[in-house]
Image (cartoon, grey):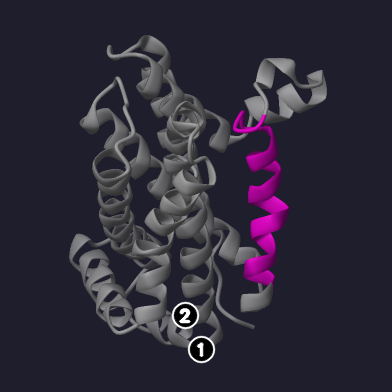
Amino acid sequence: MSIRKTLATSKRVLSQLRHDRRTLALIFIVPPVLLTILKYVFQGESKVFGSIAPMLLGIFPMIMMFLVTSIATLRERSSGTLNRLMTMPISKADFIFGYAIAFCILGFVQALISGGVMLGLLQVNVLGGTIPTMLVAVLAAFLGTTLGLFTSAFATSEFQAVQFLPAFIFPQLLVCGLFVARSEMAKPLQWFADIMPLSYSVDAMKQVTISSLWTSQLSVDLIVVAGFAIAALILGSATIRRQE
C-alpha cells in the first residue's frame, strides 16, 4: 500500500464528486432538512424532539454515507474504472482506503453541518457538549462509509447496491433503541441488536445527550463503532473485485 497512491485516489474521487451536485445535496442538505422537518412534526413537544434528534444525528450520517459510498464504489467497477486502475501499479488497499478517506472527509463535513443545525438553529440541548456530539456523528459517518465500501463488493448493479439499504440497515434501525428501549424488546431482538453497530452509535449519542461527563460507557460505544468500521474497511479491501 502506498500513501501517495491512496491520497491520489482520494483526490480523484473528491474531484469527481465536486461536480455531482445531486450527491452533494444528498450528503449535505438532506440530513439537516430532515431534522428541521422533524422539529415541526413535534411542534409543542420540544422534550420529545430533544430526545430523538441527537439519536438521529447518530443514524443519518451512517445511512447517507452507506448509500452514497456503496453506489459510487460500484459505479467504479461497472464503468470499468477499477479494471483500468488494476492494470496500473495500484493495489486494492490503495483503492479502498483512498475511497474511505475521500468519503470520510465528506462525512466529517456532513456531521459538522447537521450538528451545527441541530445544536444552533434547532436549539437542541445536549449535556455532553458540542465536541462529543460531533465525534459521535463523525464516527457514524465513518461507519456508514466503510460498510458501504464492504457491501458494494457483493452487488453487481446500482439497483442491488440500493437493495442493501433495506436488507442491511433497516433491521438495525428497528432494533437500535430509537423506537423502543432495547431492554424492552424480545430476547432474540436484544441479541441481534447487541451485535449490530448502529445500536452502539445510537447508545453513544444517548450518553452524550444525558450526561455532561465523558462516561466509560461512551468510550466503550465509540470503540465498538470504530472497531466495526475498521473491520469493514479491512474486509472491503480484501473482498473488492473487478467487474466480470
Camera-side residue of 175 and 81: 175
**Would you name the residue on which mark 1 appears?**
79
Camera-side residue of 222 and 94: 222
Magenta range is 160-179
Residue 234 appears anywhere in the view? no
- Judged from the image, the secondary structure of the residue bearing numbered disc 2 is helix
Instruction: Give yes or no for residue 93 being in the magenta stretch.
Output: no
Q: In percent of the image, x 36 and y 23: which residue is there?
A: 208
Q: In percent of the image, x 23 and y 32: which residue is there?
A: 130
Q: Position of residue 47 (x, y in %)?
A: 46, 26
- Residue 235 is left or right of residue 127, and the answer is right
Q: Quadrant of residue 181?
A: top right
Above or below residue 219? Residue 11 is: below
Q: Identify the mark at residue 185; answer none if there is no mark.
A: none
Amino acid type assigned to the residue bearing label 2 in the image? Glu
- Residue 159 is left or right of residue 53, and the answer is right
Other residues around mark 1 within 10 Å, as few (<14) / some (14–19) / many (≥20): few
Above or below residue 102? Residue 9 is: below
- The N terminus lies in which quarter of the figure? bottom left
- The C terminus lies in which quarter of the figure? bottom right
Count of numbered marks? 2
**Would you name the residue on which mark 2 appears?**
76
